[in-house]
Each structure stands twice: as structure tokens, then as C-alpha cells.
Image: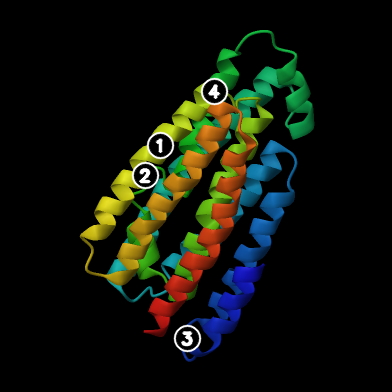
Amino acid sequence: LGLGTVVVLYSGPYMAGEVGEEKYYAMLLAMIGLIIGLGCANDLFNFWMWFEAMAVSSYLLVAFYREQSASLEAGIKYLVQSAVGSVFVLLGVALVLGATGTLDMDKIRLATSAFTSTHSGLALAGAFFVIGFGVKVALVPLHTWLPDAHSQAPSGISAMLSGVVIEAGLIAMLRALSTLGMLSVSWGTLLLGFGAVNMLFGNLMALKQVQLKRMLAYSSLSHIGYILLGLGIALISGQLAGAQGAAFHIFNHMIMKGLAFLTVGAF
């Protein structure tokens, strides 16, 4: 809500006179509302529906400058990769329903806590959630849509994508995994691995960029890595401070990267 309000105010002079300006504001407000819905959903299917609707609004905004071939290419690349990720999430939801007989998150937690050993279907569902939501979170190597999408979208939308949308994907992934009772040491190791790769790859790729918005986009990859590092440490060591630091950095990154993209738009 905070960043969305800033982006709406910023977009007044930035988008003035653009073709389809009214559609831009409609999709921006839809995206903000859908992210709020995603945070409130408490059953996996509605959770997926809110997530998918959020993605649809962002596809249209990434390809807003439809007369530019680079913008259309970025929008199509984002659409295709996100659609594949959404299929994985839906498969994971189906596996959870088959294993527990419910899609209510609270009831799933009760059902999974009763299992005495790791359920193979739920383990596979967890892997599908990591892959499916991982596309939106831009986990390396599922990140290839991000530099083009962030650099070709209007600057206000770049701020929303980097500051909120990829973090919404991360929160969605964590909520889904916690529902299955899979926030454990082994999954913490997985998050640490992704975090290390994201930090290394994001920073190295940011160094060689000559376009400022692409540099900021790759920087977002590394910051997702920092957040995953804190979460992974919390799961492996049982130290709450790791998760607190990760949650705090989600807030930091929203302010920092959101304002950075808005500044680039001003230039």
C-alpha cells in the first residue's frame, strides 16, 4: 500500500499523455489490491488464484509500451515463464489436496503434523512450490525474465515489480512450505544454496551492465539472495534473528529499490 501510493502519485507527471494511460492506472490499482488479497488468502486454491491474478496484471504493465519490440519481448518472456511456474504451483496444490483431502491451510497443518514420516506426495508438492513460486521470486536459474521485464516496464511498475511483486512471490513460497510443515533444516539448506547463487550471480551480472535499470534489476537478484540467506540460517540454526533480519530486509529492499527505480525514471 505504501509503495503503491507513492507510485500512483509519481505516475501522474511520468505517464501524462501516454496512450492507454487509463489502463495503466486500472492495472496498477488491480495489482496493489491483488497483492493484499494474496496476503489474506487462507486456502491454497484461492491463494493460487490471487497469485495468478497478480501475475496477469503485471504482464500487461510490463508490456505497456506495446509499440516497442523490446517491451513486447519482455512481456512475452515474463508471461511464458510465469505461466510455466503457475502450472507447477497448481500441480503442487493438487498433490496437497490428494494427500490431505483439504485445501484450508490450517487444516493442512493439522493433517501434516499427524504424519509420522515424510510423505512423498507432500515432498514433491514442496519441490513444485519452490519451482513455481521461484520463477516469480527470480531464483537463479529461474530469473531470466527479470532483467528484461524490469528494464522495459514504466519506471513506476519497475519499482512495484522489484519492491513488492518478487517479495510477494517469496512470501507466497514461504507460506506454502510452512503449511506443509517443510520449513526445516533440509529446506533451510536449499534456501541457503539459492541465496548464495543469487548473491554471487546477481552482483557479478550487475557489474557489467551499461543500462541503469538492468543494473538495478540484477541487483534485485542479489538482494533476494540476502533475504534467503537470513531465512536459511534461521531454519538451520533455529535462530529467530535470521528470519527477523530477512523480514526487515524485505522492507528495506522495498524502500531502497522502489525509490531507485523511481529516481531512474526521473532521469
Tell me the crowding category of disc 1: few under 14, some 14 to 19, or many 20 or more residues within 10 angstroms, Cα based: many
Q: Return the residue at label 3.
A: 14
On the rendered structure, is 34 left or right of 56? right
Residue at point 26%, 70% (across, down): 211
> Which label's residue is closer to the chain start, 4 or 3?
3
Q: Return the residue at label 1.
A: 194
Q: CA distance from mark 4 to mark 3?
A: 47 Å
Compare residues 49 and 251 and report the one nearer the observer: 251
Residue 36 x/y as whole percent: 69, 58
Q: Amino acid at mark 1?
A: Phe
Q: Amino acid at mark 2?
A: Asn
**For the image shown, how many numbered marks are present on the structure?**
4
Question: Mark 3–mark 1 contact, CB under 8 Å?
Answer: no
Q: CA distance from mark 1 to mark 2?
A: 6 Å
Tell me the crowding category of disc 4: few under 14, some 14 to 19, or many 20 or more residues within 10 angstroms, Cα based: some
Q: Return the residue at label 4.
A: 185
Question: Mark 1–mark 2 contact, CB under 8 Å?
Answer: yes
Residue at point 20%, 60% (across, down): 208
